[in-house]
């Protein structure tokens, strides 16, 4: 599976849970690796690349962290969109 295809699967997985459940990094890695039959390290690396470019973001709140799709406001604040 190509990197872009894997990143699209990760994004779809996170988007499907949006508003229902806050996903931890481990939830995403385990869920996508089971769905796509890919090694967890490969999923983890692709997810980290997505976080680095701003397609996903870490969120800290209430004493725990989660991985979410960033809002347009957040992307503007970080200078990733105009």
Image: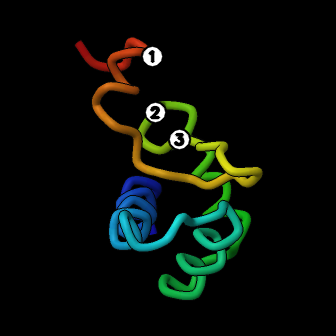
Residue 40's spot in the image, x, y percent? 70, 72
Residue drawn at x 62%, y 45% is: 48
In 3D space, how far apart are the residues under numbered discs 2 and 3 (Cα atoms)?
Answer: 6 Å
Give the residue number, with chain letter if any, for mark 1. Answer: 78
**Circles 2 and 3 in contact, beta carbons < 8 Å:** yes
Tags 3 and 1 touching, CB below 8 Å? no
The answer for how far apart the CA atoms under marks 2 and 1 are is 9 Å
Image quadrant containing the C terminus? top left
Residue position marked by numbered label 3 in the rendering:
57
- Of residues 13 and 40, the one nearer the viewer is 13
Residue with the most extreme front position: 62
Label 3 vs 1, first from the N-terminus: 3
Q: In which image quadrant can residue 5 be found?
A: bottom left
Pointer 2: what residue? 54
Closest to the observer: 10 or 71? 71
| Residue 29 % position (x, y) | 64, 70
């Amino acid at each position: 599976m190509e990197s872009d295809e894997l990143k699209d699967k990760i994004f779809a997985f996170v988007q499907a849970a949006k508003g229902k459940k806050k996903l931890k990094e481990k939830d995403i890695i385990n869920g996508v690796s089971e769905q796509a039959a890919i090694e967890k390290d490969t999923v983890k690396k692709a997810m980290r690349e997505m976080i680095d470019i701003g397609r996903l973001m870490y969120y800290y709140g209430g004493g725990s962290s989660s991985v979410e799709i960033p809002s347009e406001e957040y992307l503007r604040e970080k200078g990733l969109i105009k």
